[in-house]
Amino acid sequence: MSKTKLTILILIILSIGVGVVSGIYFYTQQSTKNIESTPTDKTIFGGVGNVRTDLPSDNTNSVENQDNNTIDKPTSTTTPKTPALRMITAGPISGADFVIRDIVASSTPTYTGTTTASTSSSSKNKKTTVIKPKILGQEEKIRYIERGTGKIYETASSTNTNERITNSTYTRINEAFFDKKGNNVLMRGLLGNSDVIQTRYGTSSLDTPTSTIMSLKTKELPYNLLSVVLSPEKDYFAYYTEQKGVGSSINISRLDGTGVFNVYKSPFREWLLSYPNKDTLILNTKPSAYSEGFAYSINIKNKVFKRLTGGQAGLTTLVSPDGLNVLVGESIEGSMKLSVLNLKTQSSKDIYIRTMPEKCVWSILEKNTLFCSAGESIVYAPYPDAWYQGLVFFNDNVWKINTETMENKLVYVIKNSVKEGIDVVNPILNKNEDYLIFTNKKDLSLWGLQIEKPQKATSTSSTKSIKNSSSKMSTSTKAKAKAKAKATSTATSTR
């Protein structure tokens, strides 16, 4: 090959190489521009909008479970959809409940205290005026107490935001109960480093007309009130006290500790109390897999004491609001058994879901209906002892159980949303029974779950049509009877 031809060939190869490199460079630059110009999905929070395919697929890194991630938070005025399962608090709580709050007109003061107007320099002529806000209606909220600080927070089932309600700090609060409106609360914990149980009644209110956060003022109640439980209307609470060598005394009082009256005295001790309806108090012996348990009812009006069930190891119970059925949990061969006892017929049916009554709640709107959480797998252990002591935890799913038909319906698989699972305790239904809140026993965090609304009863129109049909049948029958009587009369006269 001549020197001239070789030079031309080298130039051609170099030209091709430069072209390839240039093409790759411009292609890369254009692709980068396209990616950067793609608008960020602002509606991804709460599962709304298009799902980003570049996100990790495991639940621990999902947008729903993270506050600090690389995806822009929504800046539009559109409210993001609340996920079916929501972590309300990441930290531990002392107690939570649904409360009914007044909706106050923004144009009127929200301060409910008193102001003093002076008409002269003399203090005798000072006038005290009560400022009452204008109430427009009511709304349902979720209130809870932060375990470490005793501060009260509020949220709603339809939002993802939590609002602090009080600024008062109370440490070492292990247990808390709200009244119906959430302004009054019972707070319980240990006194200092002792074993003495301290119970305080707290009332929250605004200090001045310009205040935005309430103060929580407390009143000390007697020490060592054991196994406290609120009435269904949340205006009274039951508790028992123990006296060495004497036994136990079970009492009921208003939340502020006034109006105490005794309902039962017993030489026995260590009771668990429940308050299924305004007229009934339930006493359950403290359960253990190593001893037989018993459950009793007390009629609060006439103080009649009655045995409900007993003789089962590890016995725990949950009585229905109408007082007709008892959910019975017991220890059996390193596992647990659940059944429902009809108090009228004394017949019992086994429920083929292994869990405990402490993880269930009765429906009020749907008769013979329970919502229960149950672990996907059950470790061999003495129940409920091992669970109480924190030696065993569950990864629960939520079930709906009809105790009449024994139909079990899976409501929600929690591990589909929370990789590490949740051990459900203290489940509470809202008024409409379309939302469930509960505590995770693993870390005492608060969670909320949107559930299907209960089915409505037979419509009025159907009832009317049935009545109309009955009426027509009755009229037809009467007409036939009259015709028959007339025919008989005619035949008799002919004879």
Image (spheres, rainbow, N blue to C red):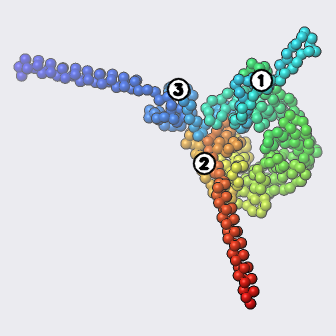
Within 10 Å of disc 3 (Cα), the crowding (few <14, some 14-19, many 20+) is: few
Viewer-side label of 2, 1: 1
- N-term-proximal mark, 3 vs 1: 3
Residue at the location (78% across, 36% down)?
179
Q: In the rendering, at what x and y percent does residue 445 appear? A: 66, 35
Most extreme residue toward the top is: 121
Q: Are marks 2 and 3 in contact (CB under 8 Å)?
A: no
Badge 3 marks a residue whose secondary structure is: loop
Q: Nearer the viewer, residue 206 or 402?
A: 206
Residue named by callout 1: 111
Quarter where residue 462 is shown: bottom right
Is residue 352 shown to the viewer in this render?
no
Residue named by callout 2: 411
- N-term-proximal mark, 2 vs 1: 1
The residue type indicated by label 2 comes to Val
Q: Nearer the viewer, residue 254 or 30?
A: 254
Residue at the location (80% across, 46% down)?
275
The residues tagged by marks 2 and 3 sit, at their Cα atoms, a distance apart of 33 Å
Q: Residue 76's mark?
A: 3
Q: In the rendering, at what x and y percent does residue 42 appear? A: 49, 28
